[in-house]
Amino acid sequence: MTVDINLVLALFAGALLAFAAFSTVLQRVSLPGPLLCLAFGALIGPHALDLLSVHGFGVPTGTLLEQAARVTLAVGLAGVALRLPHGYWRENARWLTVIIGLGMALMFLVATGVAWWGLPVPLLVALLLGAIVTPTDPVVTTPIVTGSLAEEKVTERVRHNLSAESGINDGLGYLFVMLPVLLITKPDQAWHELLTTVLLREVLGAAAVGVAAGFLLGKLFVVVRNRGLMEESAYLAFVLPLALLLLGAGKLLGTDAILVVFIGAAVFGQVIPQRDEAEEDKVHDALAQLFLLPIFVLLGIALPFAEWSALGWAAPVVIAAAVLLRRLVTVWALWPLLKTVHDRTEVTFLSWFAPVGISALFYATLAERHTGNHEVFTYATLAITLSVVLHGLTTAPFSAWLRRREPELKEEQDEPAR
């Protein structure tokens, strides 16, 4: 049955309208947009009200979800990168070196070990699942790092460091995912292709393209703005096309396009003048939600409940353990190297909030396309759903806990009373 586009518009837009109208209330009771949209998608999908089905879109489910996730990630990553202040990368080199250089490898190993120990899958499939859930998702972390409630309850360095980490490791996640993919599909050539094609051309090539494109586009922005060729409000018109341009160009050039988007947007944000335009940022946040939240409705419609049921009760426990332990073990193991960056309270917060989301969906559909293993998609969507629920429901209480425990936030809270 073909989907009626008007029904899609009414349901998707109606959900976004309802969530936007009560966004502050919903965030305060720990019901963020990604969680509600996922639940709404499951409600209108074939396993509940049966109003919509992904098969009705006329595109293979894997292709639809992969491309939707790809565009969503591009928009989300550009927004994350452009929010980071001037000088951020130089001033936070220690955090990034430790959490990316050592952290990603350790999270990959922990997630893989838990999956291999607890799931009835071969080692290579466990490696693939571990790689898929390794990156911290920038879309699911949005309620934690943006908006008035996040600014009120979470320290700036935590928000910025979580944003930067999620941006970089989403792009670098491609390197980790392609290792087991190549070992499964081309075992004799896997390491050679990983080093030459994936690392040198796609990953390092993405870094080079991102730096060059971000610098040139940033200089173009400065020139046209200084010469009065562009309206003051046109910054917003730059952001979304910038993300999509980098995404498309990066793919056409044969690089890791997700990494191109983040690096390009990060460089662009450092080249253009430092901005302090709160109202414009609010408009940008609202616009971004139109691109970030619908993917969760779509995913909710596509959730494979029957396949989850066939896995048995142990699978959700093991997957949840892999998602949570990969972060808890890693952050606390690396804390001796991070003591000068974050105190114990912030490390506790950061050791919990590393949600799995749209980046995992993108890599799961990419891996299924390369390997033909649908089991990977089943486990990955279970990981995403569990993470969205667990991290979504704990956003408000953990953020409130951080505010009570963190001295600088307590001082800000006490200022009006003085």
Image: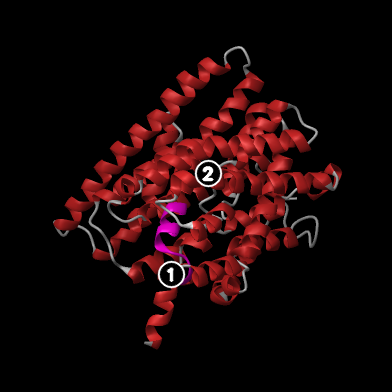
Q: Which residues lie in the magenta part?
A: 152-162
Is 74 inside the magenta-drawn segment?
no
Q: At which x and y percent is residue 195?
A: 48, 20
Would residue 372 be seen by someone viewing this image from the given angle?
no
> How many C-alpha atoms fall within 10 Å of the one at disc 1: few (<14), some, or many (≥20)?
few
Q: Are marks 1 and 2 in contact (CB under 8 Å)?
A: no
Indicate which disc residue 70 carries: 2
202 shown above or below 212: above
Q: Residue at x 71, y 27 (%)?
A: 123
Which residue is denoted by mark 1 in the rendering? 407
Q: Secondary structure at mark 1?
A: helix
Of the residues shown, which amino acid type is indicated by label 2?
Arg
Q: Nearer the viewer, residue 82 or 130?
A: 130
Q: Residue at x 63, y 68 (%)?
A: 31
Q: Secondary structure at mark 2?
A: helix
Q: Residue at x 37, y 57 (%)?
A: 83
Is 158 inside the magenta-drawn segment?
yes
Instruction: Judge left or right: residue 116 versus residue 223.
Output: right
Q: At which x and y percent is residue 78?
A: 41, 50
Q: Nearer the viewer, residue 188 or 221?
A: 188
Q: Residue at x 52, y 18 (%)?
A: 193
Tell me how far mark 1 sits from mark 2, CA to CA: 39 Å
> How many C-alpha atoms fall within 10 Å of the one at disc 2: few (<14), some, or many (≥20)?
many
Which numbered disc, 1 or 2, marks the residue that appears first in the sequence?
Answer: 2
